[in-house]
Image: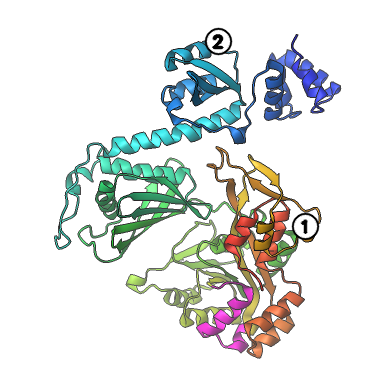
Amino acid sequence: MREKLGEILIRKGLINTQQLNEALTRQKEKRKKIGETLISLGMVTEENVFRSLGEQWGVEFISADSLAVKNPGAMSVVPEGFAKEHFLIPLDFRDNMIVVAMADPDDIVALDNLEKLSGKRVDAKLASPTAILGAIENSYEKIRKQGEVTEAIGDLQFFATSDEDDESMVDMSKTGGTEDAPVVKLVNLMLQDAIKSRATDIHIEPYEEALVVRFRIDGVLQEVMRPPKASHAGIVSRVKILSKLNIAEKRLPQDGRFTVRTTEKEIDMRVSILPLVTGEKIVMRLLDKSSFAFSLATLGFDDDESMIFRRWIRQPYGMVIISGPTGAGKSTTLFAALNEIKSVEDNITTVEDPVEYHVPGVNQVQTKAKIGLTFAAALRSILRQDPDKLLIGEIRDEETADIAVKFALTGHLVFSTVHANDAPSTITRLLDIGVPPFLCGSVLNLVMAQRLVRRICQHCKTEYEPDDAELESLMIDRAFLKGRKFYQGRGCAQCRNTGYLGRTGIFEVLEMRRNIRSLVFDNANQDEIRNAALANGMVTLRDAAFKKIFNGITTSHELLRVTVTEI
């Protein structure tokens, strides 16, 4: 006789007798299976229930992080709709058998139909419904995408021209204006997939023998498709038409933009086209124009960093500067700050290029250099608009810096960003731009360097022991670990097999205390400012990353990717 599921769970220590009795009572009321009842009551996880069911039925259980399709050909014989209906996914062909993971290996109807579809006997494994649905979405999506690409370009005709010809390489006058045109379908497919994947950039790269499409997801590029090389000219022409660029110009860089509207949001696409020796490369940056949805609590600050940052963003005047490379999340942090301090009593104005987020209650100006609306020109006009708080998208020249400093000196609170490597070098960067030391030391309240690191996927997170090579690259001794644990993601359907899902910030917060201001007044070098800041308790970017490693939030790989070795 089979051991009952409840008895197995009690034997494993996953529930106690009282919990089982409570679940049995609830089961009679709801008329569900005991496993479903235990899961709905939060007494045990779905994976533990199905792992125990595998033991009860004598069927091999496959966990979510191990559920991978080894032979895509197995999926070609099983329609996606059938797989979803019966909660199953084909994994492999083996010895005249089709290996399938199922939520119910006793489903006779499904087993019989599987044999008819594949012409093979069925080797059924067990997996949880959630894991199966995730694997179906991930695995069948690749088949759908490839099929859509093939369908989109199947009827496309291409026309070759010489470099001196002024005509477009593809005649878009007939195909570019209708949504049924193959090249339109192909470009739309890329855009839809990028939005669905939370991508921030799309790279369309021509090489000698291939055309590669990559998305930047969570700050890292991932290859997503390889359309035929011959489709490159059509894609470039379509993107140029959308961006209102010159399709006949193929020798010079071009920049443009267009907007994509979905049922849920509006995405601003910033287009850059760069001529390479192998053809024109396209990079499209995706900016979500929906309402700003971040807060300081969700950015990754620890308690000390949050307390310091909140203290200085509430001051009546002065400057708060955030530094870091492009894509480090500087604007996101500044807008989260504005979102926290905005009120009906303040006139808050921003000058940006581009406007990345739309924030209710904030007056936002988009610079347009072509018509003379530069940062400096906009700031001069804003001064006559009676502002209280001001956000400048980036300080990049002496004129902008000079106006920003004057704002701060005349009783306004100024937020801005600077491209610099760390917090101390941000001060020297401002001095290099042309801000006099006596003004720089007077107006600065807080300088903060920032980076983004990827979060470990919580669906496939696992503990591991770092080897000597990894510890050497981190420049730490094994004795330093002292029981601290390292974690990583093994890769699953939820994280596209990367082991990461989402991002969080690491911060280097430098308060402008009296000793730091004195150093700036005396035109001290970067190392002197850094040493004084460390003595004041500043935590470096690298140490902030180590904290997140030991808290199980990110990995050593991310630390090495975004921070430099400190010697």
Q: How far apart are the two marked residues, 2 and 1, measured between alpha carbons?
A: 53 Å
Q: Residue extending furthest front?
A: 95
How packed mark 1 is, by other alpha carbons closer than 10 Å (few <14, some 14-19, many 20 or more), is few
Instruction: Find the magenta span and give its range.
Output: 420-440
Give the residue type that dot 2 points to: Ile
Q: Residue 70 in magenta? A: no
* Residue under the image location 50 percent in, 76 percent down: 383
Q: Locate the N terminus and report the quarter of the image it occupies.
A: top right
Disc 2 to disc 1: CB gap under 8 Å: no
Q: Nearer the viewer, residue 551 or 199?
A: 551
Q: Is residue 279 left or right of 514 when viewed as pictured? A: left
Q: Is residue 442 left or right of 326 when viewed as pictured? A: right
Which quadrant would residue 431 be assigned to in this image?
A: bottom right
Q: Is residue 349 left or right of 237 when viewed as pictured? A: right
Which mark is drawn over residue 539? none
Instruction: Say whether residue 410 is visible.
Output: no
Give the residue type that dot 1 points to: Leu
Instruction: Say whether residue 222 is visible.
Output: yes
Residue picked out by circle 2: 108
State how many labels appear. 2
* Residue under the image location 73 percent in, 83 percent down: 514
Q: Locate the C terminus and report the quarter of the image it occupies.
A: bottom right
Which quadrant would residue 421 be assigned to in this image?
A: bottom right
* Residue under the image location 79 percent in, 28 percent down: 14
SS type, badge 2: helix
Which mark is drawn over residue 481? 1
**Upstream in the sequence, badge 2 or badge 1?**
2
Relative image position of residue 119 (x, y in whole percent): 43, 14
Q: Residue 424 in magenta? A: yes
* Residue under the image location 28 percent in, 48 percent down: 229
